[in-house]
């Protein structure tokens, strides 16, 4: 009959059509075949940190020293021919007392005992603060044990919040840095807050797990098991070394 439906040809299947072969590069195929958006993924703007006023002053002073050094290099031949009969009074004596690692702003000698006690105190304070941050970061930030940097230290020093200050004895030879240290020392003496020259910049940064060196460190609280006793013995040693420094300085001058 004409009304009869036309039969479709039956599709023949093979046994191999039902076998799934796992490829070793299946994961890589999925990654390659994945549709990648043409639009760049938004990750937020990375703002470059602006230098503080203190940093700007230091950079300006470095530039001035660099220019001065270049000017001095131009007249080196003339300076070499000059013969100075008498040295400038006091300069040779000061050089005997101070060095690159023990700058002129230091007012007490640094002994191995002072270095060891400074290291113990800083390690303890760092451990106390890290433990508090792991327990509760919000409370730990509100009740910090210490701060670092001239800006932070000066801010809390003016309101007499600090109990102890550690200053690196090997800071950069820079008039702006020297002014900052003198300012910190005068404010500390006014509020009767002790300051100690014990550890170098790199050592301070290493103990606080910082990627950069640390110039100054202000302590809010040093109460703890053994830390309080270490600070007391440290301060007594510093007072003794201050007297020795003053006696030697007077003898030289």
Image (cartoon, rainbow, N blue to C red):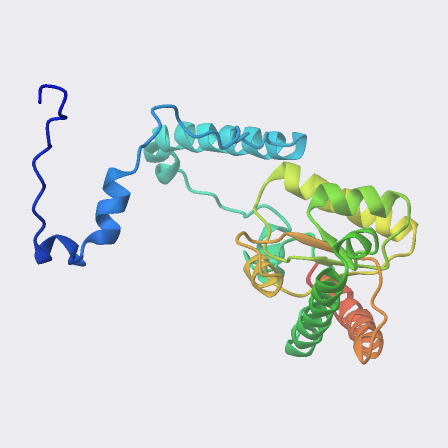
Give residue 203's position: percent from left, percent from top: 57, 63
- In the displayed structure, 62 sits above or below 18; it is above
Which residue is pictured at 7% across the width and 46% down the height?
A: 12
Question: In the shown orientation, is residue 156 left or right of residue 68?
Answer: right
Question: In this view of the protein, which residue sits in the foreground, 252 or 148?
Answer: 148
In screen coordinates, is 94 left or right of 28?
Answer: right
Determine whether 207 is above or below 192 in the image: below
How far across and how far down the image is residue 207, in percent? Answer: 60, 65
Q: Nearer the viewer, residue 43 or 27?
A: 27
Residue 121 found in image quarter: bottom right
Q: Residue at x 70, y 63 (%)?
A: 134
Residue lying furthest top = 2
Front one among 14 and 240: 14
Residue 178 vs residue 208, the one in the foreground: 208
Residue 163 sits in quarter: bottom right
Quarter location, residue 49: top right
Residue 46: % across, % down: 52, 31
Quadrant of image for the C terminus: bottom right
In this rendering, would 187 be left or right of 72? right
Residue 231: horizontal and vertical position, in percent?
A: 81, 72
The answer to whether any part of residue 251 appears in the image is: no
Classify 22 as above or below 152: below
Q: Is residue 95 left or right of residue 137?
A: left
Q: In the rendered view of the protein, which quadrant contains the N terminus?
A: top left
In percent of the image, x 56 and y 59: which residue is there? 101
Position above or below: 101 against 243: above
Whether residue 161 appears in this view of the structure is: yes
């Amino acid at each position: 009959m004409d009304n009869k439906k036309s039969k479709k040809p039956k599709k023949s299947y093979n046994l191999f059509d039902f076998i799934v072969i796992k490829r070793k590069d299946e994961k890589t195929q999925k990654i390659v075949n994945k549709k990648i958006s043409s639009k760049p993924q938004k990750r937020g703007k990375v703002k470059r940190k602006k230098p503080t006023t203190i940093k700007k002053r230091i950079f300006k002073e470095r530039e001035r020293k660099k220019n001065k050094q270049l000017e001095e290099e131009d007249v080196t031949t003339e300076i070499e021919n000059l013969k100075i009969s008498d040295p400038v009074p006091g300069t040779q004596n000061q050089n005997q007392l101070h060095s690159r690692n023990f700058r002129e702003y230091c007012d007490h000698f640094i002994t191995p005992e002072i270095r060891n006690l400074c290291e113990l105190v800083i390690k303890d304070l760092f451990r106390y603060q890290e433990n508090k941050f792991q327990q509760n970061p919000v409370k730990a930030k509100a009740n910090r044990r210490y701060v670092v940097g001239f800006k932070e230290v000066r801010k809390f020093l003016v309101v007499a919040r600090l109990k102890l200050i550690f200053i690196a004895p090997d800071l950069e030879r820079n008039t702006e840095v020297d002014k900052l240290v003198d300012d910190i020392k005068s404010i500390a003496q006014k509020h009767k807050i002790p300051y100690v020259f014990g550890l170098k910049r790199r050592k301070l940064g290493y103990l606080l797990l910082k990627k950069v060196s640390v110039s100054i460190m202000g302590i809010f609280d040093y109460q703890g098991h053994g830390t309080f006793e270490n600070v007391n013995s440290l301060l007594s040693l510093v007072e003794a070394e201050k007297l020795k420094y003053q006696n030697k300085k007077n003898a030289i001058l």
